[in-house]
Image (cartoon, rainbow, N blue to C red):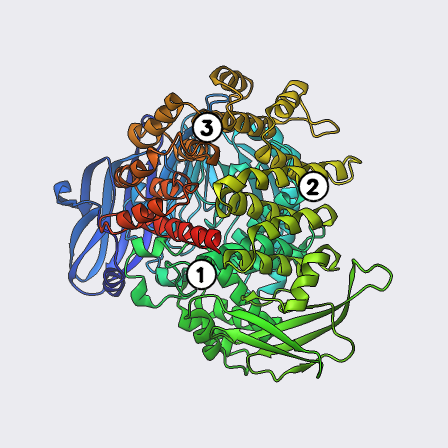
Amino acid sequence: MPVLTRDEAQTRAQLLDVHRYTVDLDLTTGDQTFDSTTLIRFTARTAGTTFVELKPATLRTVTLDGQHLDPETLTDNRLPLTLTEGEHTLRVDAAMRYSRTGEGMHRFTDPSDGETYTYTQLFMEDVQRVFAAFDQPDLKAVFEVAVTAPDGWTVLANGITTHQGDGRWQAAPTPLISTYLVAVAAGPWHSIRTEHAGLPFGIHCRRSLAPHLDADADEILDVTRQCFDRYHEKFDEPYPFDSYDQAFVPEFNAGAMENPGLVTFRDEFVYRSAVTLTERQTRAMVIAHEMAHMWFGDLVTLTWWDDIWLNESFAEYMGYQTINEATSRFPDTWVDFGIARKAWGYDADQRPSTHPVAPDPDAVPDTASAMLNFDGISYAKGASALRQLVAWLGEKDFLAGINTHFERHKFANATLADFIDNLASATDRDVHTWAEQWLRTTGVDTLTPAYDQASGTLTVTRTGSRPHHVTVGVYDHDLADGRRLVLRDRLEIDVPDQAPASLPGPRPALIVLNDGDHTYAKIRLDEHSEERALRTLSGIPDALTRAVVWNCLRDMVRDGELEPATYLETARAHLPQESDLAIVQGVLGFAATHIADRYVPAEDRPAALALLTDLTRDLVRRTEDGRDPGLRLTAVRHYIDATDRPGTLHGWLDEGGVPGGPELDPELRWRILGRLAVLGATEETAIAAELDRDPSATGQEGAARCRAALPTAEAKQAAWHRMFTSDDLSNYLFTATAQGFWQPEQAELVREYVPRFYPDAAALADRRGPAIAEAAGRYAFPAHAVDTAHLRLGEQHLADDNLLPALRRKLTDQIDDLRRALRVRKA
């Protein structure tokens, strides 16, 4: 189907003013399709031709100003319109297909109780799967939505909904919003409602998750209220919509979606098993992130998709910063950002698919290319750039510029130029030059220190092109305990403009660039500091500084400057003393998924896993007193994933828990069974029994993952058929099956499937579309196959010009990661 181009959108925006959509959806017509009737009122500034978008199962009737149009003129997803100057009314009546891939109107039946739920995800161009629309972000309109739903269902929407009887629900008209932000969620929801600041607030989930939402309702609502109040302290413009609902919905592709008045979240955020404080912090951050969008994205919306960073970078920055400021329960959120989220940005920015935070408009010519920019650059790098901007500009001037931006463009659209002009109006600093240097360039700068002991001076060199305002941490050994470090001084310097900085006194034990992590750059350590960091890393007093140093070591491994074994040994030495859970999780995650699975040769993998097994066993022993359940849970999870001792895992399953805790909840039971499947230490009967014990949607995913992981030719053949031939897996069941299929321990068994992946994934993407294409490229890719033959095969298939863009982007990234893994092994 054709995608909307920027030129087409600009032409249509010059022709049309869209005023109001009246949308009527009937969800009672069956489990395959629903009825959709749309009335669009708009004005043509001049006579001309254009089109409206729609992807129907059946297009029944179309009328323009009362005159019937031929439904057969619909070509792919476009219905042509010939307009006279003046006001018009377009009415479209169609049957639309439900989705199983998280696009459009997704339909889900809960295996726990048989209840059915539907919700919309209309981002980018999927509104066309639900109702007819002039589908581009700068044609904002008022939306009036009515829904007919089965008895016993509740309908949620962007505005307050009213039940009018006989299953009929009417949502209050919205203010001016973009088509992609319209939202409906319908089903027998379990709802908790309250009021705050004179507005109705609500949280909602499917009924089978009700006990788990009830258990966390106070926490979720407290975070929501605290963020709401903090944003009203920061922003002059009040919350612009009539209510604030948060719906936790099944099989959601993203973390959440910022629909005004009705934010949708993946319902894994309703925790049914034990989680760590860091995971709760992540949920809180996502709540804050999506609420920030109510202003930046919903109130003021990008004009075209080249400025998606204006939505996501801003919300990412504000999410972490606001949770830090507004809540007292969580530790410093910037540690988690630095050790986990920021690495996402660094990795993305070093691949061939990198792009500027704010791409040139010509680089985003259509919606297909725009979709590829939802990555670590638009989120993590962009948020890092904003954090550096605030460090350089000052928060007072930053917020003054933001508030000017809201005031000038509320309920309208804006561009990067508008944003920078509004920031510039609040400061004497040259924000325009800063934006060119930071937002229009690609790649990661590297900052390297050099300390001259004779003169006591520090010089910092930069590889790259951006200016950096950074803090330098200078540390000495603690005289009472040589394993610990104490802060001597922190210096603020500007790279590359700063003259050598004087460091009076004896030679420091450790010099850390970017202490506080306020800029976006790889850092290196001078030779003396590197040696001391490897020996005394856990003795650095501040968690954020430790995160910066761990990131330095991570980057050095990826760049071939530090042996993977050295990183593992450093983790073995220092994680047992680490007090910040985000750091433990980040270091163990990199050690397992990058080093053990890809960076060490196959013959060295058992030793790497043995080290991780010993390390996590130490962490389990350290937490026997019960004072750190989050660390203990993290250690148990990673022990399960690393161990080659099925006897221990069978013992835990039989006893229903780990000696000394935790008890095995559903997540841990499926995790253990998955590892046993990989090791060939379980079979189908055990998987079926566990599914009987846990028949939930998550249980169905766990069973799919375990079955695909069984080390038999029959299991692999069946899993491959389900993924690439049958087309009946939902997005989540596809992902679970793919996660189980490839296992480094089973490389010989699945070798024949490596060359099959590329043509089968391409055909699957063509049949099932972008969401499944992205899942196939991310989860079904044979990442374990780190060899030159696989690299050549991947490069050969990338030369196919017919690959769906979503799949091409994922394969480009995966093959570059494969290329890097080979370089690391050689180094």
Residue depicted at x 28% and y 40% = 37
600 relative position to 45: left or right: right
Q: Secondary structure at mark 1?
A: helix
Residue 308 in the image: state x and y as whole percent.
41, 59
Q: Which residue, given by chain and number where applicable, does mark 3 sit on?
A: 709
Residue 679 in the image: state x and y as whole percent.
52, 27
- Count residues near mark 1 (Cα–Cα under 10 Å), then give few for <14, some for 14-19, many for 20+: many
468 relative position to 254: left or right: right
729 relative position to 295: left or right: left
Quarter of the image for residue 556 reads bottom right
Amino acid type, residue under disc 3 in the picture: Ala
Q: Secondary structure at mark 3?
A: helix
- Disc 2 to disc 1, how far (Cα)? 31 Å
Residue 728 in the image: state x and y as whole percent.
33, 28
Q: Nearer the viewer, residue 792 or 425?
A: 792
Q: Which residue, given by chain and number where applicable, does mark 2 sit on?
A: 631
Q: From where the camera sits, is residue 284 visible?
A: no
In the displayed structure, would residue 646 be above or below residue 181?
above
- Count residues near mark 3 (Cα–Cα under 10 Å), then give few for <14, some for 14-19, many for 20+: many
Q: Nearer the viewer, residue 266 or 650?
A: 650
- Disc 1 to disc 3, how far (Cα)? 32 Å
Amino acid type, residue under disc 2 in the picture: Leu
The mark found on residue 432 in the picture is: none
Q: Which residue, given by chain and number where applicable, does mark 1 sit on?
A: 349
Q: Nearer the viewer, mark 1 or mark 3?
A: 3
